[in-house]
Image (spheres, rainbow, N blue to C red):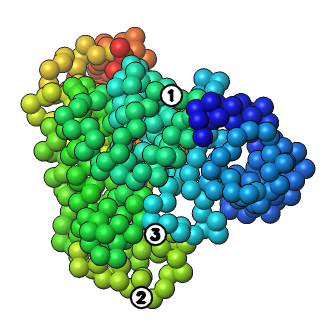
Amino acid sequence: MTSDDLAALREALLDAGFTVDGVAEALGVQASAALARGERVPARRAATKAGPLGALIRCFVLGDDVDPGELPRGEYGDLLEGGRATVDLRPYAEADGEPWFVVSDRTDGGTVKRADHVLGVGGASTMLAHATVRPEGARSLDIGTGCGVQALHLSRHSTSVVATDLNPRCLDLARLTFALSGITEVDLREGDLFAPVTGEQFDVVVANPPFVIGGQSVVGSRAFTYRDSGLVGDELSRRVIDGAAEHLAKGGTATVLANWLHVRGEDWQQRVADWLAPTGCDAIALQREVRDPSEYVGTWLRDVGRDLSEDEYAAWLDRLSALEAEAIGFGLVVLRRTGAAVPRVVVEDAPEPALPPLAPYLAARLDALDLLRGEVDLGSLRPVLAPALLDVLAVQGDLGWAEVARTLRLAGAGIATEVELDEAGAALLAGCNGEHSLDQLADVLASLGVERQAVLASATELLLRGVLRRTR
């Protein structure tokens, strides 16, 4: 299909109302909710009543055979064989009023049938998009672009975007994603990880690599390129983190999804910290999930539609056992190249659900790591409290209600953060509106018997946790 064909097809899709809102309206609340659960019958019933838009939904979203004459006029090329879609094509989002589409491989019946399968948008890629810190005017890099969804987001704020992938089919479908989304400025390059960008540096790096541990039938093979690296254990994750740091320009930020082993007799946090320390970057690693070996194997076998057969399941467990894996962690690693002589590294367990927007929270924590190197007069800072809620627990006493606990919870930070406060701490935060310096607040708190050093120590901890943020 030519670029003109794809541009015309994009207009045909939009004219038919094939957008996120259009599909939701055509299906209705109940059928949309059922489809999100993987139940297609209600969506199919609703789509049959929606004319050309319904035909697009049945063909490209549900994977039904349709009469091509029911579809909006346009050149579909290899996207159709007869009346059956060869790919999954669906509206994804809208950016600055311009609808986006994502093209990926179908998983009819939940089964992945080809080794070069191109994955669509899932929970991991959505979390990565929400977590990526996005400065304007950046030169950006998407490692392992897959269907191209991260590059779509990067295109909104970047002067240039390079996207790499080892899998030629990923590049083919990503080109369709960009063309149908009206995006023309992404530089697609074929190659393994960072090989296509040797010697180059970027302001933003994102990576959702094939981090699954032990899935290949033989070490060195790739059962599924989107999932399996062919490397032993969690070596792929370590290499991607190291490569991302190497390709960061000064001030640049990388966001990487990774798996890591919980090895018998080792501290997993130290294991990850040992990856991060040599990068020369400030780093924050958040562990979002932990799964035992059997849960991990079952999850990834179901991911490709396998029946959890005894032989395959047992062989995978044997590979994890040989690595002395007690569990496998999944998480998010954020790096920033500050040029500091001594980088700072934070590794935390953060199992609560991650919700958008996560990026401002991560950016604030990276800013605090850089700020609190001892090169700034803390007392002169005029911090502001991030959006938060204060829960007060009180019990009835002889003289009325007596407060026994105060818990601050960040609101809309994308991650659950709770801080236990005493009376002085609550008073400190109440005054952090960007207008008062910490020195001024310390003078006020002195009347409550709080020493200046205690105020600064509390402020330091709250800055590092993203609760207090520096005003610009």
SS at mark 2 in the image: helix
Identity, as a three-letter code, of the amino acid under mark 3:
Trp
**What is the crowding at mark 2: few (fewer than 14 residues within 10 Å), some, or many (at least 20)?**
few
Horizontal and vertical percent for residue 468? 37, 28
- Element at label 1: loop
Question: Quick check: 296 above or below 255?
Answer: below
Assign a secondary structure to mark 3.
Answer: helix
Earlier in the chain: of badge 2 and badge 1, it is 1
Residue 298 or 175: which is nearer the viewer? 175
- Residue 85 percent coordinates (x, y): 68, 55
* Neighbour tally class for label 3: few under 14, some 14-19, many 20 plus, Cα within 10 Å: some
| Residue furthest left in the image | 341
* Residue shown at the point (70%, 40%) measured from the top left: 75
Residue 198 spot, x, y in % from top left: 21, 38
Q: Position of residue 12 (x, y in %)?
A: 75, 34
Circles 3 and 2: CB atoms closer than 8 Å = no
Foreground residue among 403 and 254: 254
Residue at image x 55%, y 40%? 177
- What residue lies at 73% left-to-right and 63% top-to-bottom? 39
Three-letter amino acid code at disc 1? Thr
Q: Quadrant of the N terminus?
A: top right
Left or right: 428 as drawn, with respect to 178: left
Residue at the spot of label 2: 311
The answer to which of 428 and 209 lies nearer the viewer is 209
Quickly name the residue at label 3: 300
User: Which sits earlier in the primary sequence, circle 3 or circle 1?
Assistant: 1
Mark 2 residue type: Asp
- Residue density around tag 1, few if under 14, some if 14–19, many if 20 or more, within 10 Å: few
In this rendering, the answer to whether 88 lies above or below 339 is below
Tell which tag, 3 or 1, sits nearer the viewer.
1
- Give the Cα distance between marks 2 and 1: 47 Å
- On residue 184, which mark appears? 1
